[in-house]
């Protein structure tokens, strides 16, 4: 889009006249009525100073590339402003056509009687309105750019033909409102304005006292281009470089101030009309400059011969177009609330003024934004721990135990921005989980709240979690936060209300870490309640520093608590079946047979004697923490069964999940799929805790297939069954991060 300085109003707009009155009255009061020449000189300098301040502000905004901020201004507010301008133009068309001032034109019963019952007044405003409507019927069918200017050139020609044919005196037509009355202004030359500039008469004290009003006017002036420029872009369906427009406004106002004129900015209506009649190039701009210069030297005399119906019809056309664009064209393109906002802005701009309408639109938009986002559920999903398990490979019986008892873990996955309008639904959902009959049917031991998809938390939402924590603490439920760090925006918001440091509250950076911690707490509860020594190596250590906190969280005030009894019952049925045959004398089963049995103990009808025939193909491997067993993409060297320690597998994927980690604990198999399929490794495997492993190398696997075909098939089947369970859980954990 080209910037046309000549399309800027070089005369005070109606909206800014109160500011100029305030400046002039302030200067007159300070100087005194007995010094009229000093008042005039100081006032003119004050007006020019306001132009310079406005120009510097516009230039700074454009040069600093701050126009991009305007892109965040809601479009439906701009459309409402467009409709408000259209309504104002229709009202202006009525006042111009009936030769009434804006102060005299009020929508009262007396005004309506004058408009409709006075035949002369009815003819004055209906004829240009009919001409405007007729033009729109023509342009709806034909779209040539010359139609518009030729139509308005034909109106005065037809008007004077009728006047000549009827022999009507021009003086009578002027008195009756059919022609403009230029008054005595035509006798004043434009250069006489500068005779009032006498810098020797300027009073700087009263001038500086107008600065508060100057800054208020500056703010008002700055408000218009950020609204008018994007609104013009919407009407013209063109992209606009707002920064370039602001720089152009800066130059224009600086030049205006230097020549002693008042602030100026792009006139939306004039520019829109200029573009719609084909003035979208530099040649048209230069032609308009020439025409304006001619009128400057000729004066306002020709205006006295311009029919009022021409100006009235032109104003009506623009007003009807803008109202149609705001109300009719958007009826199927915006939501109901946005449409209400558009209509309300138009009403407020018509009843009050431009600024009030814009401010009202912003307030209404904020209100509707809160209402709309309050209706959007901030809870993305609710899971239980048996369907969302951590990516930790555990012995099959331990996993069976966790899958059963983890029904007492509830995962609440949140999304969006949590504020006073959305947190209510979250709080009500949690309260419903703790009330009967929901509590009796599914008691909760851990409530995991995942903030991974949460953009931020306001103070009201943060304080709601304080209430939630107190409610959960009364039920001996541990509140587990995850998906953020303490130094993040969410973390700082929760720290400000002291909920992160409260008792019974844990924090982890990822959902996987949080689920690993809760699963470890379940395992510790069963192992320690049975006082089984050495059980700490049966599962990985929690991701945070160990303490007795997990025992406190998982314990209930009553020894006969249904939650605690259920945990022990399930543990006896699952893990107890694994521990009982080996306790208190685990040495009766040698290694690696003991680890093999542990790894495949969930398979019914497992034959320990047949598995014993496989142990000769395994070799013992001892690796320290930090040792890399293999890297992603390496050729397989075999599979490993973990006797003690912890391994960590790191997967590198394409977006959106670029990085994922999986823990492997004693009694599990590592590297099995790539070894059985003889394909490259799909992850990098590192020893996290000093590990003792039993390795079945690729050579040993081939030898087993050659010497013990049936035993090899049985072993492969056991490994694949375990692998399917492991990878189902792994894929579920990866999907939970999406």
Image: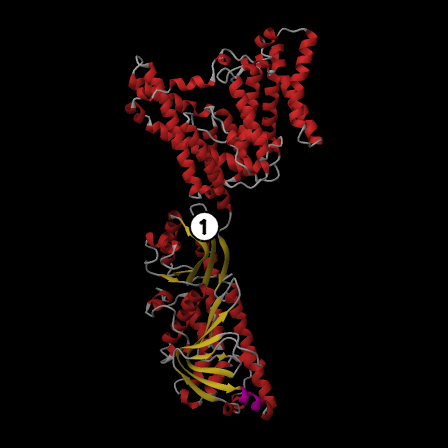
Q: Nearer the viewer, residue 187 or 613?
A: 187
Q: Residue at x 65, y 17 (%)?
A: 156
Residue 389 located within the stretch drawn in magenta? no
Residue receiving disc 1: 417
Residue 338 place in picture, x, y as percent: 54, 38
| Vertical side of 170 occupied by 372: above or below | below
Picture quadrant where residue 271 is located: top right
Q: Which stretch did the figure color magenta?
A: 698-704
Q: Looking at the picture, how far across and down is residue 554, in whole percent?
A: 38, 66
**Total numbered circles:** 1
Depth order, front residue of 272/534? 272
Q: Quadrant of the N terminus?
A: top right
Q: Position of residue 446 (x, y in %)?
A: 42, 63
Q: Is residue 126 above or below residue 248?
A: above
Vertical order, 535 against 111 (above or below): below
Instruction: Please tell me which residue is depicted at 35% across the width and 20% down the height of the picture.
Output: 198
SS at mark 1?
strand
Question: Relative to residue 732, is residue 157 drawn left or right?
Answer: right
Q: Residue at x 49, y 77 (%)?
A: 396
Nearer to me, 30 or 475 = 30
Q: Is residue 497 above or below residue 57?
A: below
Residue 521 sits in which quadrant? bottom left
On whether residue 699 falls in the magenta region, the answer is yes
Of residues 726 and 149, the one nearer the viewer is 149
């Amino acid at each position: 889009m080209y910037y046309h300085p000549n399309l800027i109003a070089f005369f005070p707009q109606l909206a800014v006249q109160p500011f100029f009155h305030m400046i002039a009255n302030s200067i007159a009061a300070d100087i005194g009525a007995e010094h009229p020449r000093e008042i005039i000189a100081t006032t003119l300098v004050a007006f020019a100073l306001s132009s310079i301040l406005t120009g510097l502000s516009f230039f700074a905004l454009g040069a600093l590339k701050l126009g991009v901020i305007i892109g965040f201004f809601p479009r439906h507010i701009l459309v409402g402003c467009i409709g408000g301008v259209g309504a104002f133009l229709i009202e202006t068309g009525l006042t111009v056509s009936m030769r009434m001032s804006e102060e005299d034109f009020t929508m009262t019963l007396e005004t309506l009687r004058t408009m409709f019952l006075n035949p002369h007044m009815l003819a004055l405003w209906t004829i240009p309105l009919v001409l405007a409507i007729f033009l729109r019927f023509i342009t709806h069918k034909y779209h040539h750019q010359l139609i518009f200017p030729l139509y308005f050139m034909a109106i005065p020609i037809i008007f004077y033909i009728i006047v000549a044919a009827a022999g009507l005196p021009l003086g009578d037509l002027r008195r009756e409102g059919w022609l403009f009355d230029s008054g005595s202004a035509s006798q004043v030359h434009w250069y006489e304005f500068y005779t009032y500039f006498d810098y020797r008469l300027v009073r700087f004290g009263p001038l500086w006292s107008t600065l508060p009003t100057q800054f208020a006017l500056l703010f008002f002036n700055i408000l218009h281009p950020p609204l008018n420029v994007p609104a013009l872009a919407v009407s013209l369906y063109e992209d606009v470089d707002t920064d370039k427009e602001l720089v152009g406004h800066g130059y224009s106002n600086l030049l205006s101030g230097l020549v002693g004129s008042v602030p100026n900015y792009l006139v939306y209506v004039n520019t829109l009309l200029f573009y719609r009649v084909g003035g979208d190039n530099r040649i048209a701009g230069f032609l308009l400059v020439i025409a304006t210069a001619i009128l400057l030297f000729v004066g306002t005399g020709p205006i006295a011969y311009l029919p009022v119906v021409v100006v009235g019809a032109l104003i009506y056309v623009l007003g009807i177009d803008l109202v149609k664009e705001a109300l009719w064209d958007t009826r199927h393109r915006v939501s109901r609330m946005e449409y209400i906002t558009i209509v309300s802005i138009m009403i407020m701009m018509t009843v009050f003024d431009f600024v009030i309408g814009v401010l009202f639109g912003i307030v209404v938009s904020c209100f509707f934004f809160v209402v709309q986002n309050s209706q959007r559920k901030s809870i993305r999903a609710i899971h239980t721990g048996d369907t969302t398990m951590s990516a930790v490979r555990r012995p099959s019986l331990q996993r069976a135990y966790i899958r059963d008892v983890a029904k007492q873990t509830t995962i609440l996955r949140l999304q969006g921005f949590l504020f006073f309008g959305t947190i209510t639904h979250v709080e009500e959902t949690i309260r419903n989980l703790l009330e009967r009959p929901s509590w009796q049917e599914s008691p909760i031991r851990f409530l995991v709240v995942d903030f991974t998809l949460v953009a931020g938390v306001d103070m009201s939402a943060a304080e709601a979690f304080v209430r939630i924590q107190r409610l959960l603490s009364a039920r001996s439920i541990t509140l587990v936060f995850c998906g953020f760090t303490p130094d993040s925006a969410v973390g700082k918001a929760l720290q400000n209300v002291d909920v992160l440091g409260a008792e019974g509250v844990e924090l982890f950076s990822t959902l996987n870490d949080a689920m690993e911690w809760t699963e470890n707490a379940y395992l510790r509860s069963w192992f320690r309640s049975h006082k089984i020594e050495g059980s700490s190596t049966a599962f990985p250590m929690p991701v945070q520093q160990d303490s007795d906190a997990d025992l406190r969280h998982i314990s209930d005030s009553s020894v006969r608590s249904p939650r605690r009894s259920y945990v022990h019952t399930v543990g006896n049925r699952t893990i107890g079946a694994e521990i009982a045959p080996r306790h208190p004398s685990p040495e009766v089963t040698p290694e690696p047979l003991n680890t093999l049995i542990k790894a495949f103990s969930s398979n019914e009808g497992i034959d320990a004697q047949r598995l014993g025939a496989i142990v000769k193909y395994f070799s013992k491997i001892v690796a320290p923490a930090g040792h890399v067993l293999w890297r992603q993409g390496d050729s397989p060297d075999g599979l490993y069964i973990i006797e003690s320690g912890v391994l960590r597998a790191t997967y590198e994927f394409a977006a959106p999940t670029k990085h994922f980690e999986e823990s492997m604990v004693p009694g599990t198999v590592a590297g099995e799929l790539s070894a059985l399929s003889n394909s490259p490794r799909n992850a990098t495997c590192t020893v996290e805790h000093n590990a003792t492993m039993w390795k079945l190398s690729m050579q040993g696997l081939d030898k087993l297939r050659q010497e013990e075909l049936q035993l090899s098939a049985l072993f492969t089947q056991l490994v694949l069954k375990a692998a399917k369970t492991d990878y189902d859980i792994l894929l579920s954990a990866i999907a939970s991060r999406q």
